[in-house]
Amino acid sequence: MAKAKKLYVCQNCGASQNKWAGQCPACSEWNSLVEEQAPESAPKGLGTRKGRRIEFVGLKGTEKQPPRRVSKIAEFDRVTGGGLVPGSATLVGGDPGIGKSTLLMQVAAALSGSMSCAYISGEESIDQLRLRAERLDLAETPVGLAAATSHRGVRHIRIPTTVLSQNDSGVGVKNAVNFKGIKNYVGTFAPPWAVLNDLDFLDQLPGRERVSGIVEAVKVALIRDPDFYRWLEQNADALATFAPEAEEYMIRRSAELHMRQIAHGGDPFEMGSARPLDFGHWSAHKLEAMTNHHVRHGEAVAIGIALDARYSVLVGLLAEGDDERIVVLLENLGLRIWHPALESKDADGKLSILTGLRDFQEHLGGDLTITLLKSLGRGHEVHQMDATLVRQAIAWLKLRKRA
């Protein structure tokens, strides 16, 4: 067995050496060296002859402190000294059953508007988490993102609970969260292993949310299925009053069309710049941001569809009168086709909504590609938009709203 190595460490300055001496060569203190056993494999840089000086600093720093993340949950912000410090980790202790999980879920939801949050539980089933989230009236957590990144991809099963997610986003392959004010900035492409659409969830929705989700069915019908579009027109009253059979068929057919486009459209993971399923969305995304999301996504898409339908007429793609037909359907469903924010201008006097084209191009990550309409049920892609005609389309929407 190898003989254990020994070190002689000065109790005054911390310096170490391999041989004992009466006087420390580092600080000149007499009789201060004490024999200690050296570590079996000291990391490089440790065990040098000179010890490491300890710096003492005052509690009051001179550097500017980073702003804290405030949850607006009084007790949590109080015990964290006014909110979370960026880069910090907070360990919450206490006995079981004192409401820690509920508090942390509320905090995560409160902070998610200004930062990316993940709620991870090691002791509760996903059913328990969903029940708590529903009871607390909290938004859905990005479980798709977590499933795509955990263990290189675990089975991701979606249970959409809104009309919009059951007929559109819930059957897609995108999982993302908003970040720094940019929609779907952080995320993955991960097809769900299964999607369970339970229509009983829809009975718990406010009417406004329920109606706004129908617009995604209108969107996909306009670009892919003229027969389905005509069915929507014929059943607008039933859909607006949430008749079960009509609502179920609308969701099922819309989901089928979305899945068909994703599976057979040639670009399921959006490597190119074409986004046919984003018809009506270039202005919708901007309108949502401009109104601080007071305008719901579906409501904004309804306005975007009306805008792009009129623009399609102005550029000679869509027959005159078809734009009016589309607007009548949207209004019969209970959706507005006008919002004053469409007339908002930036510091240079330009329409703010037009910057949505630039934002949408960045979202596409390539050439600008906008889907317009060639007929009711047939989309058509263009790669530029005439600002003058966009203004004319907005003016038409405003004039029609007054009428």
Image: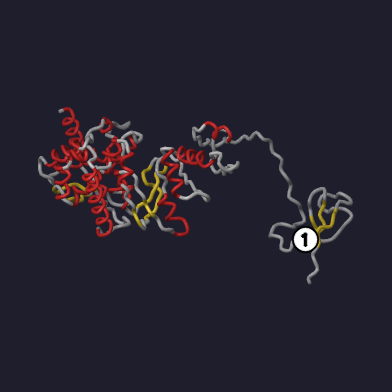
Q: Which residue is most to the bottom? A: 1
How many marks the image carries: the answer is 1
Name the residue nearer the viewer: 287 or 219.
219
Is residue 256 or residue 353 the one in the foreground? 256
The colour scheme of the drawn protein is secondary structure
Would residue 225 appear left or right of 100 to someone viewing this image?
left
Q: Pick the quarter of the image with the N terminus.
A: bottom right
Asked whether residue 384 appears in the rendered view, the answer is no
Q: Residue at x 71, y 63 (%)?
A: 41
Residue at position x 26%, y 41% from top?
301
Residue 215 image offset from top left, x and y in percent = 24, 42
The secondary structure type at the circle numbered 1 is: loop
Q: Is residue 235 left or right of residue 292?
A: left
Q: Is residue 372 left or right of residue 118?
A: left
Q: Residue at x 56, y 39 (%)?
A: 98
Amino acid type, residue under disc 1 in the picture = Ala
- Tell me if residue 278 can be seen: yes
Residue 273 x/y as whole percent: 28, 53
Please name the residue that numbered disc 1 is placed on.
38
Q: Which class describes the residues within 10 Å of circle 1: few (<14), some (14-19), or many (20+)?
A: some
Q: Residue furthest left?
A: 320
Q: For the C terminus, which image quadrant?
A: top left
In this view of the protein, which residue sits in the foreground, 352 or 199? 199
Give the x, y percent position of residue 177. 40, 46
Residue 322 lies in quadrant: top left
